[in-house]
Image (cartoon, rainbow, N blue to C red):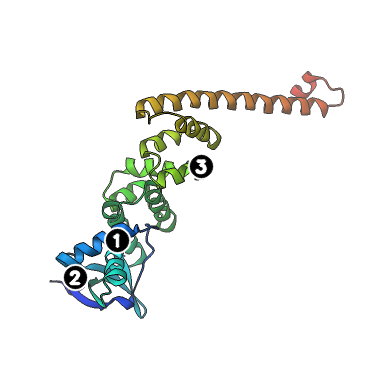
Amino acid sequence: MSEEYKVRELETAKIVPGDNDRQTFEEQALQDLARSIHKDGLIQPVTVRPKGQVYQIVAGERRVRAVSQLLKWETIPAIVRDLSDEEAAGIMLAENVHREELSPIEEARAYAKRMEEHSWSAAECGRRAKVSDGRVRSRLKLLELAPEVQQLLETGNLPIGFGEELARLDGAHQRTVVTWLSNQRSRPTRETFAAYVAQVYEQQAQTRIFDMGLVLQAGVVEAIEQTEDGRLWHCLLY
């Protein structure tokens, strides 16, 4: 076995969280994991990298939390790897997307962060996370949702498919659709929801055309007022 992948026993007190994409850890899920580890042992060691006098978690933060906080283990099996920030970011992304069940918004932020910090393309994010670049792009669109709509997605109160449909709309029209949805006796199918969003999208487009017309009209009036004789042909010619 390569020395890099050799399992070592590390003190849990010397292991610190990494720059994790997952911001919330459900207490019940951690308790379930702790019970499983207590019964069957830690099947897979965590992965860390040296950071000064401590070790930063690259993969396995839930496992570390379960054994250190709930089971009170003083040591934990770990693989120590020398990784750059970019290499660690890639491993963390794949770990979280496939094993930690990120919320759609957390997943979207994870892609956006790597695109900003490491100049990754959507395709590179997909390659690292082992998902399609289409999935990456659809998740990134969710970041265009209004904050309160994003919150609904994060808490599981809005299906991700509905969020993807809503991303077509601006914030005001997203709120209109969410209000309509909350007034339904039962959750509509995605097809029904998409049809309603399409209607609202048409209204949004018409509103924008009307608003643009007002802007242009105001611009013409201002141009006329700024001419010496106030004639429209004069401002158009000059």
Q: Position of residue 168 (x, y in %)?
A: 46, 33
Return the residue at label 2: 5
- Toward the bottom, the furthest residue is 53
Q: Tell me: 111 left or right of 216.
A: left
Q: CA distance from mark 3 to mark 2?
A: 44 Å
Q: Is any atom of residue 42 visible in this view?
A: no
Residue 226 image-quadrant placement: top right
Report how many numbered discs are placed on residues in the image. Answer: 3
Q: Circle 3 — which element?
A: loop
Query: Three-letter amino acid code at disc 1?
Result: Leu
Q: Position of residue 238 (x, y in %)?
A: 77, 26
Query: Three-letter amino acid code at disc 2?
Result: Tyr
Q: Position of residue 74 (x, y in %)?
A: 26, 78
Q: Nearer the viewer, residue 197 or 212?
A: 197
- Image quadrant for the N terminus? bottom left
User: Cβ–Cβ below 8 Å for labels 3 and 1?
Assistant: no
Q: Circle 1 — which element?
A: helix
Q: Nearer the viewer, residue 122 or 92?
A: 92
Q: CA distance from mark 3 to mark 1?
A: 31 Å
Q: Is any atom of residue 25 visible in this view?
A: yes
Q: Tell me the tag on residue 30.
A: 1
Q: Tell me: 67 left or right of 162.
A: left
Residue 159 image-quadrant placement: top left
Mark 1 and mark 2 lie on one chain; the one further toward the N terminus is 2
Q: CA distance from mark 1 to mark 2?
A: 26 Å
- Toward the right, the furthest residue is 229
How dense is the environment of label 2, judged by Cα within 10 Å: few (below 14), some, or many (20 and up)?
few
Mark 3 and mark 1 lie on one chain; the one further toward the N terminus is 1
Q: Nearer the viewer, mark 3 or mark 2?
A: 3
User: Cβ–Cβ below 8 Å for labels 3 and 2?
Assistant: no
